[in-house]
Every structure is written in C-alpha cells, then in structure tokens.
Amino acid sequence: MSDNPYNAPPQLTADEDHPADPREGLSKPPRRFSVIELLVVIGVILGLIGLLLPATRSARPAAYRMQCSNNLKAIALALHNYADKYDALPPAYTVDADGKRLHSWRTLILPFLDHQQLYDQIDLTKPWHDPVHASIAQIRPLPYGCPATSVADDMTTYLAVVAPDACLHPTNPRPLADILDGLANTMMLVEVAAGDAVHWMCPQDADEPLVMRLGPDSKLAHHGGTNIALADGAILFLPDSASATTRRAMITIAAGDTVE
C-alpha cells in the first residue's frame, strides 16, 4: 500500500537547502558622494565660473559699444537721407521770428528714422518744451540712447558738432558741398559723457570747447574714447588721447587742415 502523498514528509529543494538571502531582490541604496568628492565637484564648478565671468564682463562692454555704433550709424544715415531730400543737412535748430530756439535737428530727422507718427504729433511752431509736447517729450525715440550710458529715459548723449564752421550750422541748412575738408575728415556727431547729456528734443549740441575737453577724465561711456560719426556716415572710435590738433581739424569743414 502506497503512502498517502498528503502525509509524505516535505522534500527540500536545492534552494531550500540553501535559503535565499532576504536582502536579495531589494534595490540597493544609491551611492553617496563623499565629502572630498563633493568638494572636488564644487571646485570644478567654481573654476568654470571664474573662467566664464571675465569673458562675460569683457563681452558686455564690447556689445554696448557695437550697439552704440549702430545707433550713430542709423542717425548719420537719417541725416544723409534728409540731405538727399532737401539738398542740405538740417540746421542744428529752428528759430522763431524773434530768434528763439524752437526745435532740434533730432526732431527734424524723425521721419527718416521711421518715426513719422511721432513727428506728426509735434507742433514745430511752438518750442520743444511747450506743454503741448509734454507727453511726447517723455519718449526718447530709438536710436537716441546709448545702452552703456546711465541717463534719464528722455535724455541723449548723441550730439551734433555745431558751429558756423562746423558740420551743422546753428540756424541754416548745410549743403554737403560746403564741407571742403572732405566728408571723411569732418566730424558730424559725437557721443558725450552722461554729464553733458541733453533732453532729446532740446536744441542744444556740442560746440568746439565741449569736443576739445572729451578726454580721459570725462567719464565717457566707453573705455578709452568715444564713438563719433563722420560727415560721410562712417563711424569711428575717437581715442580720449586724440590731440587737440586732430580734434580741431575734424571739427572745421573748410579750414584746409588735415586730420593726423
């Protein structure tokens, strides 16, 4: 008679002969960084930051200077487009019957800077600071602001060089043919220091004394000098060490002098 299989003694399997480790099948805890490894990683990150920050600091002034050059280029082009239409550069400012200043050349060239709508809101028969212009005066149009200069939103550091013998005449249009020293040798626009900034609508610009004193102590927006626009539309960087002879030669339009 066979044994009742239900009463048979349990047979141990091979695995039961060697019970499994209860820890098997459980996920292993993640490996933790040691303090030394963390310090190494932090050191690498700080080293990379140290390498990148100087490059960032040097790139930003260069970008600001380039944007400033582009601004002056746009303004110079607008002046030339004005001259193409009216056969002369605009006067530095308009005047009323009593000779009082009304509006700047910066206002007169607005249509050539794609600001026709803004220009149409300005009453050229009333002074720039008349209450009728109060809301308009608060808006400094592009491209009259240098990104590297900290001035109020309605101020500009882009001035024309103005004198009876300079690129822009105070009250009369200036035909380009009058610039006998050569368009490429004559300064038309100059970027001045923040302390010399003017309201963008104000009929005030740079005379010879102002251009002559733009030196190392002027706190210019760009290290080592300032951007200028020549009468031919070219943009140059005028070193703050430029001699008085060079500056004076670039200001006059028909003195027969040469730029060093």
Image (cartoon, grey):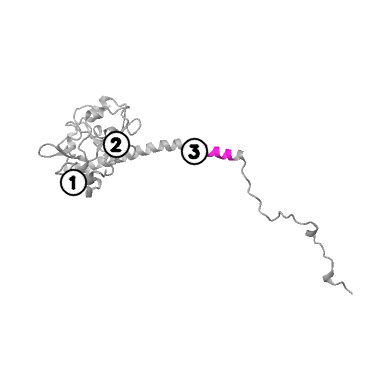
- The residue that appears at 58% across and 38% down in the rendered structure is 39
Give the percent coordinates (x, y) of residue 117: 22, 50
Front tag of 1 and 2? 1
- The residue that appears at 53% across and 39% down in the rendered structure is 45
Magenta-highlighted residues: 38-50
Quadrant containing the N terminus in the rendered view = bottom right
Which three-letter amino acid code belongs to the residue tagged 2? Answer: Ile
- The residue that appears at 52% across and 37% down in the rendered structure is 46
Q: CA distance from mark 2 to mark 3?
A: 35 Å
The picture quadrant where one finds residue 160 is top left
Using the image, tell me which numbered label, if any, was put on residue 235.
2
The answer to whether residue 258 shows anywhere in this view is no
Q: Nearer the N terminus, badge 1 or badge 3?
A: 3
Instruction: Give neighbour class at mark 1: few <14, some 14-19, many 20+ (Cα, 10 Å).
Output: some
Residue located beneath label 1 in the image? 132
Q: CA distance from mark 1 to mark 3?
A: 52 Å
Describe the element under mark 3 as helix, strand or loop: helix
Front tag of 2 and 3? 3
Dominant SS of magenta comes to: helix
Q: Nearer the N terminus, badge 1 or badge 2?
A: 1
- Within the magenta stretch, is there residue 47? yes
Residue located beneath label 3 in the image? 49
Quadrant containing the C terminus in the rendered view = top left
Q: Are marks 1 and 2 in contact (CB under 8 Å)?
A: no
Which three-letter amino acid code belongs to the residue tagged 3? Answer: Ile
- Within the magenta stretch, is there residue 145? no
